[in-house]
Amino acid sequence: ALSATQVAGSVVRVIGPALAGAIIALAGPGPAFGAQAVCFGLSAVILFGLTLPATEPAPESPAIRALDAVREEMRDGLRIVWRNPIVRGTAAVEALWQLVFSSLFVAALVYVEESLRLGDEAASAFSVLTACFAGGTAIGALVARPVERHIGRPALMAIGYLAPLTLIPAAFTPPPPVLFACWLALGFTDAWA
């Protein structure tokens, strides 16, 4: 189930940047933001159409009780994370991983804009970079199970956590196709982390 979710997310990450790149290349950034606004609007319409199962009403003062319940659930969750070494370690690694990848994507945007000096083509190049990454994660998720059977889960995860090393060639300002291949490899191995 997790692999299927990861593949679906990766497919969306391929289609979104590719579509945005095409819109930006053909019509500029304004229509791309407009398309994103339409997507958010459609999401809101779909969410309003959902029917949720009935729940029991909250006792007495609903706003205060609900806020107290949320706080208590958050405290319970944090206690579980803190007391369970496996959950604590996983949460710490995932938090660090998200911070690293968020920073990496911002740095990639600046890198494409400033270091590669692509001018008006920078937005399209960044879209291709993110599409390569997403395509790599989709392929990596599809082959993760057989690879795991062959090399074991610890080795598979170690390769995944070393994934950022695939970007070392970027330090030498390679031509875009080499950079695209690096991001494809990054996505491929990131799917294993």
Image: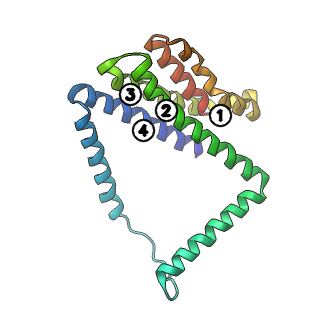
Give the side of residue 148 with respect to residue 171, left or right.
Answer: right
Please state the horizontal and vertical placement of residue 170, each as a whole percent of the image: 53, 17
Q: Residues within 10 Å of mark 1 (few under 14, many from 20)?
A: some
Q: Amino acid at mark 2?
A: Phe
Q: Nearer the viewer, mark 3 or mark 1?
A: 3
Q: CA distance from mark 2 to mark 3?
A: 11 Å
Q: Which residue is mark 4?
A: 12
Q: CA distance from mark 1 to mark 2?
A: 27 Å
Give the side of residue 5 with respect to residue 45, left or right.
Answer: right
Q: Which residue is mark 2?
A: 105
> Which one is nearer the viewer's eye here, 32 or 188?
32
Disc marking residue 145: 1
Q: Amino acid at mark 1?
A: Arg
Q: Which residue is mark 3?
A: 127
Q: Residues within 10 Å of mark 4 (few under 14, many from 20)?
A: some
Q: Amino acid at mark 3?
A: Ser
Q: CA distance from mark 2 to mark 4?
A: 17 Å
Kind of element beneath mark 1: helix
